[in-house]
Image (cartoon, helix red, strand yellow):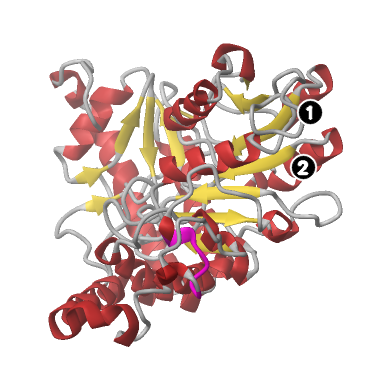
Amino acid sequence: MSDTNPATGHALADARERDAADPLGEYREHFSVPDGERYMDGNSLGLASDTALATLERVVDEWRALAIRGWEAADPDWFHYGEHLGDLLAPLVGARESEVVVANSTTVNIHTLIGTFLDTLPGTPAGPDPTADPPAVLVNDLDFPTDHYAIRAQFRQRGLDPDEGLVAVESRDGRTIDEADIEAALRERDDVGIVFMPSVLYRSGQLLDVDRITAAAHEHGALAGFDCAHSVGAVDHALGDAGADGEGADFAVWCSYKYLNAGPGATAGLYVHERHHGTTPALAGWWGNDKSTQFDMRHTYDQADTAGAWQIGTVPMLSSAPIEGATELVREAGIERVREKSLALTDYLIDLVDDRLGDDFSVGTPREHARRGGHVAIEHPEGYRVSEALRDRDVVVDFRPPNVVRVCPAPLYTRYEDVWHVIETIQAIVESDAHREYEPRDGGVT
């Protein structure tokens, strides 16, 4: 393959010019980019940075030197570490510091927050009117599965039928969710008490309109919650001001190992609007106790009057420490500039797909900036085999059924040159039929 496509003028030199002019280009030096690879899987696991490793190593050194004294003598102290990290993350999600805490895993946070707010609704055993008709939770049929698993479990634990209570908005095209259909579902169902949607759909990369969904939920009298796992660190959220009158989304959850680059299994984060502080968590644990009385060791729960109340067990320091260093880079770069580069990279990627790949390829991600997250869904009838061929050629992507190769040019460490080479490699694979050497998908992680 040549360095220039004569039909389009997309040249490697052009990509390198873009890199030379990139104001965030220097941040790549902070990351351990695997030698010889084009890493395009940051929407599943971000790369390790020197700043993330530095804060992890600092905590390991504190453990070595201070042992148990680290809970008070470390800097910052471990006892308040979840709240400390919440303070650092709050600007990235557009919330007050008291509304954000780092705690638990994403799925555990869905359990505790959905459970908490179900318990505030009529028709649930702990609600204000247990004799009322049970409430429904509005989701969509393109959700990441764990969201539905957790919500169904919370219905079952309250003796409610999840088949009745979990209402899914259907996709019109199998790729995206139209916010108008969420609004229509709310008009059709007067029993919806919670709307729980992703900010970005994990397969197609569609960015949903958090403001519009929040406004629709509140107009209906429902709560608005969001799974932001595929957006935090790549999209400049304003959770605290979402909605028609800036009243704010009610709650949200996210993970820290994708665009926040905090490592595999890093501790998750959550947001609870301040108007809900004081609401009893469904999964109460001692780490959510008010810090001033936590070690009084009373058997009566004295919950924190912040989002910290939704912590459950002791902060896992070694899974949390990398968040401090990893997010230092996002904060320094500025989430608005990170978002700007993310859109520029995905614009470039989409243009290359259109110009250089054949008719068997299509882009399943919305092209409008306001509807696009941080990755691009490249669709092909043999998407799985193409993804396997890419991996064997040192291009790291992932596959999602039925036909999506997800390509994520993470803005802090991906170059335009990398994007160019990815499309160059795909073009070479399909032109030589190299993907047909691989067996069709038979399951497993990709």
Tell me what residue is drawn at x 36 percent, y 69 percent: 326
Tell me what residue is drawn at x 58 percent, y 56 percent: 271
Q: Quadrant of residue 323?
A: bottom left
Point out the image quarter for the C terminus. Answer: top left
Q: Quadrant of residue 268?
A: bottom left
Q: Please give the residue where the numbered disc 2 appears in the rendered image.
A: 212
Q: Quadrant of residue 391?
A: top left
- SS class, disc 2: helix
Q: Report if residue 414 lies within the magenta region.
A: no
- The CA span between labels 1 and 2 is 9 Å
Percent from the top left, x then y, of residue 239?
66, 56
Q: Amino acid type of disc 1?
A: Glu
In the figure, is residue 46 to the left or right of 150?
left
Magenta-tinted stretch: 287-292
Q: Report if residue 289 lies within the magenta region.
A: yes
Most foreground residue, 367 or 220: 220
In the figure, is residue 139 to the left or right of 51?
right
- Quick check: 207 above or below 259? above
Percent from the top left, x then y, of residue 235?
56, 56
Q: Is residue 19 visible?
A: yes
Label 2 near label 1: C-beta < 8 Å? yes
Q: Please give the residue where the numbered disc 1 appears in the rendered image.
A: 183
Tell me what residue is drawn at x 42 percent, y 31 percent: 146
Most foreground residue, 337 or 347: 337
